[in-house]
Image (cartoon, rainbow, N blue to C red):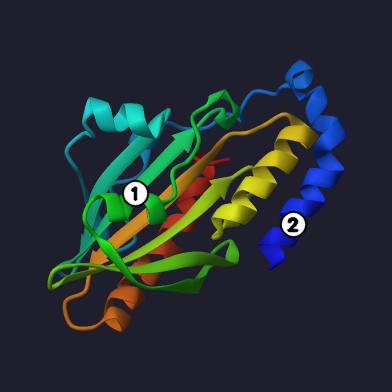
Amino acid sequence: MLARALIVVVAIAGAGAIVDVAARRQPAAPRSPLSTLPRVIGEWQGLDAAPLADDVLATLGVDDYVSRRYVRAGMPVAAYVGYYADQRSGDAIHSPRNCLPGSGWEPVASGVVPIRSGNGTVTVARYEIAKGTDRQLVLYWYQGRGRVVSNEYANKAWLMLDAARSGRSDGGLVRLIGPVVTSPDETLRELSSFAAALLPQLTRYLP
């Protein structure tokens, strides 16, 4: 309900400003390449995953990304961070809710979870998926232009508002995936702990 209300407010307040946004478009804020994201984050050791195929990159329309497998005490976390410099050019962030089912994974449960980090507490999306007898847990959020957002509709509303107000439409998607071995709660604890360690690092990459 809050997300829908925000969209309505943005549409009304920003309609006039969007008309001349092209004339005052601002470049994305300076940032570090995602390839320089630390391979050691807290107690997790990272290893680069295989590069995404060209057709996948073309579909995503991403300007920069990193895909790594981080491990702590034998528990793996598949981490993906994608950055988009200008989402008004036709390339916009694809929601994991749409991409994962296309890979054969079906949703089992969803919700949100708070993550406490050095920057305070933020809310991220939680998504449990299944393929046959395999289970995985996904945490994801949208980050950029000074905020972390868990909801797709709220993220689009903020994108419209920021484009009208400052001329910026850069942003990113952060997605963490872990296998459910014993229980979803155990996997959630591990993913949440990694997310808390990762979030302070991301301000240099998703400004």
Q: How far apart are marks 2 and 1 (CA)?
A: 25 Å
The image quadrant that residue 29 belongs to is top right
- Element at label 1: helix
Rate crowding at label 2 as few (under 14), some (14 to 19) or many (20 or more) other CA atoms within 10 Å: some
- Residue 80: x and y, percent? 33, 47
Q: Pinpoint residue 81: horizontal percent, then vertical percent.
A: 39, 45
Q: Which amino acid does label 1 sit on?
A: Cys
Relative to residue 121, is residue 68 depicted above or below? above
Mark 2 or mark 1: name the one nearer the start of the chain: 2
The residue drawn where x is 34% and y is 49% is 99
The quadrant the C terminus occupies is: top right
- The residue at 64%/23% (across/down) is 27
Q: Tell me the amino acid under the disc marked 2.
A: Leu
Residue 123, image quadrant? bottom right
Residue 6's label in the rendered image is: 2
Q: Name the quadrant containing residue 119.
A: bottom right
Q: What element carries label 2?
A: helix
Q: Which class describes the residues within 10 Å of circle 1: few (<14), some (14-19), or many (20+)? A: few
